[in-house]
Image: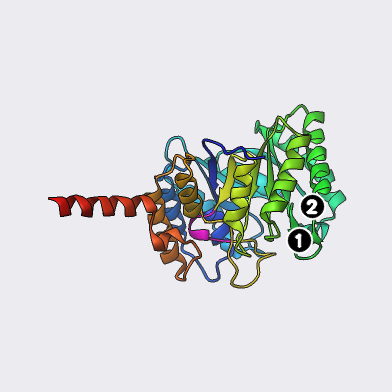
Amino acid sequence: MSDLPNRIFIKEEGPREGFQIERGDIPTADKIALIDALAQTGLKHIQTVSFVNPKRVPGMADAEAVVAGITPVEGVHYTGLWLNKQGFERAMATGKLYMDGKLTLYASEAFLKRNQNRTGDEQLKAQPDLLRSYQHAGVPVRTGFVTAAFGCNFEGDIPPARVVDLVRQMCAIARDNGEELTLIGLADTMAWATPERVKQVVGQVRDANPDVAISLHLHDTRGLGLANAYAGLQMGVTHFDAAVAGLGGCPFAKHAGAAGNICTEDLVQMCEEMGIDTGIDLERLIDCSLMAERIVRHPLPGKVKAGGSLRALRAKLAHAGHEGQG
């Protein structure tokens, strides 16, 4: 089916996705400056840091300091990532983040073992306790998330039926504890998705959960990120994760030199040309992508930051034509 939405919602994950994997130290002040600039673009959801073991992810050792230094913009949700109860408690303790409870299961047990040193059964059994921690803290639980939903470097292709079953289990855990999941995130953690696979998995998850919105977290490691996003749009997906300038990737899955998440400004450019509203000022976002490249001190894979937006080019041509007529 083809069911293009009129508007989409983008969760910016560049500061977290990018700075967790960059080699060498990124100054805390630079991280804060990028987050503050992103908040001026029209983005309404910015994932700032991850609360993980700093010995495993040194780039997030200053997570609390980054959050403390942000200058909040009204209407912008600043969030953090955590993988367990301890990380959640650290995020809560900042007192500055928008807290949204999330259940997470892994479609690849091999990747789960590498990422969290857990089995699938252990991850499943941990979810009710995590959910109750959210409830105790007054945090609503509305999101379920399936990691490695399309394939895995260690296991290969993931059957869509497995993803559907994991979503079923998360929804059941939520309902058993008086909650209702309204958003299901599907992550292409290791870039195994193709447009056809996106349509298959999204279609089967949506058929089994017609009242739940779907979000896509896509990586561009094999150059299919935007094509997969377009396939998602055709399936009516309205929520996407993206990273400014294409920052980042998973530190436990990424190939050396490979691209990370789909690039925010490239996604915004595509949607803008398709008449799909994002609510984002593309020119300001391009400025942020150039800032990100300066901060990490090496080229980043985003394309629009180099080529410029088509809107700006049209305006330049129109201005040149007007001057010529004058």
Of residues 171 and 301, the one nearer the viewer is 301
The location of residue 234, given as percent across then percent down, is 62, 43
63 to the left or right of 185: left
Above or below for 315 versus 296: above
Residue 55 in magenta stretch: no
Of residues 82 and 235, the one nearer the viewer is 235
Task: Give neighbour class at mark 2: few <14, some 14-19, many 20+ (Cα, 10 Å).
Answer: many
Residue, far left: 326
Residue drawn at (84%, 52%), measured in percent from left and top? 120
Q: Is residue 115 visible?
A: yes
The location of residue 312, given as percent across then percent down, is 33, 52
Residue drawn at (16%, 54%), measured in percent from left and top? 324
**Residue extent of the magenta highlight:** 243-248
Residue, far front: 325
Residue drawn at (76%, 61%), measured in percent from left and top? 152
The location of residue 320, given as percent across then percent down, is 22, 55
162 to the left or right of 273: right
Name the mark on residue 107: 2
Q: Quadrant of residue 58?
A: bottom right
Residue identifier under label 1: 152
